[in-house]
Image (cartoon, coloured by chain):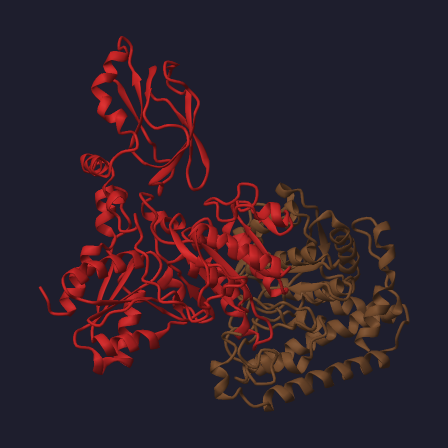
Chain colours: A red, B brown
Amino acid sequence: MPIEVLMPALSPTMEAGKLAKWLKNEGDSVKAGDVIAEIETDKATMEVEAVDEGVLGKILVADGSEDVKVNTPIALILAEGEDASALKGDASRSADASGSKAEEQAKAEAKADAKPAKAESAAANPPAPKALPEPDVPEGTEFVTTTVREALRDAMLEEMKRDERVFLMGEEVAEYQGAYKISQGLLEEFGAERVIDTPITEHGFAGVGVGAALAGLKPIVEFMTFNFAMQAIDQIINSAAKTLYMSGGQMGCSIVFRGPNGAAARVAAQHSQDYAAWYSNVPGLTVIAPYTAADAKGLLKAAIRDENTVIFLENEILYGQSFPVPKLDDYVVPIGKAKVARPGKDVTLVSWSIGMTYALKAAEELAKEGIEAEVIDLRTIRPMDTETIVESVKKTGRLVTVEEGWAQSGVGAEIAARMMEHAFDWLDAPVARVTGKDVPMPYAANLEKLALPSVAEVVEAAKAVCYRD
Amino acid sequence: MAASAANAARSNADDAETVEAGDVLSFTKEQELHAYREMLLIRRFEEKAGQLYGMGLIGGFCHLYIGQEAVVIGMQMAVEPGDQVITGYRDHGHMLACEMDPKGVMAELTGRRGGYSKGKGGSMHMFSVEKQFYGGHGIVGAQVSLGTGLAFANKYKKNGKVSLVYFGDGASNQGQVYESFNMAKLWHLPAVYVIENNKYGMGTSVERASSNTNLSQRGLSFDIPGEQVDGMDVRAVRAAGERAIAHARSGKGPYILEMVTYRYRGHSMSDPAKYRSKDEVQKMRETHDPIEQVRARILKNEQASEDELKAIDKEVRDIVNAAAEFASNDPEPDPSELWTDILR
């Protein structure tokens, strides 16, 4: 049997990529370690090395094929002693190089053991919010399909052009173009004085950023992930968030700390924590966690302009997802305003960032069963738009919060407490929370999936508060 | 008066580069009298703060600068207008040296509305944008990264200013100090790191806390030059300060000055200082006091008479008494201030 070469996953969150170029032709002999192809992920172009020895018998996915799913067979290698006739048994597969939906599904199922967490993750295909038009987007505005990654870059690009005090610093933000390619092109545009690679020194460069902000600059400090910002949290809270108060209003700190937050995929406990609740606990901080690309752009622009310390929590899995972004010269989304992402009357689901993927999919499921869920995208965690949630609860009488972070002292706990204070008389059922499980994030794919919330859990919780089976 | 004396004191700045490390520039009469008056102001201010603490008018933590006055006054004689100062929690002397109003500083210590932070910061958290004083920081070592950020901003703005970053022997063992050293040298930031080695990090002597007690060498791994300075001699401090500041301003990057000094009082008001002998303290006071050294020189060189010095003493006492008076009678902040200055 010929050996199948599968489309490799080249990053923890990669689900598909472009087969940019074959470097070997059919009939070439290959040995382990030979570079056989180049693959473009959403972050970089990577080389694929052969693992097996033999002859490249058949190329199944041609040069330039886009969106080739991970684990799709891309070539067949003939082992020693095999000849082209061995390929015949694989004719059906080669004829179906692009892969029909049915076959892909079958393959995905067959490989369920290998990749369950990602294949079935709610984030795989993010449901588009049934976007109610933003109040500040004029009628007839053109929308451009944009990834969250590009939207974040565009926001920084526009604000750096607008204000010379704005600069970007962090690990790999300049020459490497960003560990997650968020800062692509910024070094070329603004030069090394304004796009600054730091050593691996989170505590130190967070403090340097805060000091520069105290002196009147407007730094954007990128953390490769917020997990690493724990090294720097003293500077964020004690130096950035508190100085305006401690100085009696004399000296403030206008700075944005941004980067991916929460779980990516299969990176285990130390790289998978959601910090929304931690930072939202602190007066003096503004905490933003957008879901869509439009919000990522509009809120990051607002964050950079803000005169205070802003924690901007991104999500690695969302970086590559595309959403419509209004084509406007200056699209700024106000901080502190939640958004009704899907209207409904029976139950309110509140979430933000990647949590929205569970909430919106759950709303679709619930609709099939005749339950109309209203989904609120909180967007800003602090200051929290309590009013929008209360208004929804007045209509639905039922509330479920959805977050990947832990339950205890979580954002959902805060929302529940606020509903006790502000909407008690309108609640027809106790507020339910769907959260990450109360465990460090495990590595094993099945355990990781169990540790995260699921669409099913959201559906179940929504039915429970509606007293439906 | 203070400003003009400071300007006079700076007039020798151009000669600084010609002076070898360890040399002590002799002061002019104006410089001696300036140093004497400014150091005395800190001394009397701190004594008064200690007194008000004992009376219950000042609460919480209160770290006095008594004994270390020559460090900050000598350094301020070497700066140019617009150079920044940032330090830790033992900060009253730095604020006075930056010409902040003693009334506003003392009223902050007593938690009154006329304080620099409207009573909301206290002893460890005061700032003055006008005087380029960036605090006043309560977390040991945090100001080193922040001060490096001030230097970063100077370079970014190309404004030719230098950031003076003060920290103690205790803070010199914090990790972020070295993270900051690395970036400062890597990026040639105009920072002068002033390590005030007063021999004890709270109750732990330098010998018990530091594997290498020569703190001026702490920048060696980063190729940052450093020198030890007699921090009890204001002339030595100023001379070293001018060398270091000129180095930083010229674009050569950071410089480290280890000021060997001594604090007479405990770490904070509640520290009985049992970790050292009374003799040790007494000896320092008698033989190395920074103010007495200047006073003795002034009299010996007949730069001023006893009576003239007494007049300075009286003027300083009056300023401190007026500050204490203000700080005792100024009202507490309005309760509505609880909710202000959280966001802009």
Residue found at the very far top of the displayed protein: A81
| Residue nearest the viewer, comparing A276 with A467 | A467
Furthest residue in direction right, as rendered: B302
User: Is residue B106 visible in this depiction of the protein?
Assistant: yes
Using the rendered image of the protein, determine whether residue B145 is visible from the camera's viewpoint: no
The residue under the point 37% across, 51% down is A318
Identify the residue at image location x=73%, y=86%. B318
Total count of labels: 0
* Quadrant including the N terminus of chain A: top left
Locate residue B209, reporting x and y percent: 53, 52
Q: Is residue B288 left or right of residue A409?
A: right
**Which residue occupies the foreground of this view, B339 or B164?**
B339
- Residue A191 to residue A383: above or below: above
Name the quadrant containing residue B10. bottom right
In the depicted view, which residue is nearer to us: B127 or A256? A256
Image quadrant in which you'd find residue B144: bottom right
| In the image, residue A76 above or below residue A325 | above
User: Which quarter of the rendered picture does the C terminus of chain A lie within?
Assistant: bottom left
- What residue sits 84% from the left and 66% below the top? B9
Outermost residue on the left side: it is A469
Percent coordinates x, y for residue A145 in the rendering: 42, 52
Q: Is residue A391 above or below residue B219?
A: below
